[in-house]
Image: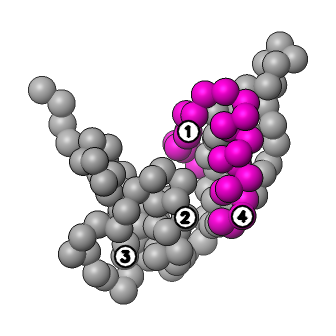
Amino acid sequence: MTTHWTLGCDAADPHRLAAFWALALGYVPEPGYDEPDGASIVDPDGRGPAIGFLRVPEPKTAKNRMHVDLRLGGEPAIRAKAAELEAAGATTVREQRYGGRFAHVVMLDPEGNEFCVA
């Protein structure tokens, strides 16, 4: 049997970060969750884990030890999603290639957390 789990994230602005990741993942705000210093998003189909964002006073100071990879498959879909996320506040760091072939885009969310669009 699998264990249900939630991903917890620190944030300077939990509502802004939750809105960004809801757009990135196709998630929605968790119904009934209304906290000024926290936000939670859920998979509307109920399959994926919930993701919570909690306001913390300290800034991000180093590279993430774990990050999210969005798996879209195919260069056109990857580039389209990366452009959509840039418009929503993400920053493109670089395009990654392996053996000369396009593989994925490394990005930063609005608070500087690394993730990949692959």
Q: CA distance from mark 1 to mark 3?
A: 23 Å
Q: CA distance from mark 4 to mark 1?
A: 18 Å
Secondary structure of the residue carrying numbered label 1:
strand
Question: Going by the image, does 87 lie left or right of 101?
Answer: left
- Label 4 or label 1, whichever lies nearer to me, is 4
Mark 2 highlights which residue?
20
Query: Going from the N terminus, do you reach mark 2 or mark 1 first?
Result: 2
Mark 3 highlights which residue?
38
**Amino acid under disc 4:** Ala
**Amino acid under disc 1:** Asp
- The part of the image, by quadrant, that contains residue 5 is top left
Q: CA distance from mark 3 to mark 2?
A: 14 Å
Query: Going from the N terminus, do you reach mark 2 or mark 4 first?
Result: 2
Q: Which mark is residue 95?
A: none
Question: Going by the image, does 25 lie left or right of 62?
Answer: left
Whether residue 35 is visible: yes
Residue span colored magenta: 63-89
- Label 3 or label 2, whichever lies nearer to me, is 2
Image quadrant for the C terminus?
top right
* Residue in the picture at 73% in, 26% down: 103
Q: CA distance from mark 2 to mark 4?
A: 10 Å
**Amino acid under disc 2:** Phe
Q: Which mark is residue 87?
A: 4
Tag 1 and tag 3, C-beta contact below 8 Å: no
Secondary structure of the residue carrying numbered label 4:
helix
Query: Going from the N terminus, do you reach mark 4 or mark 1 first?
Result: 1
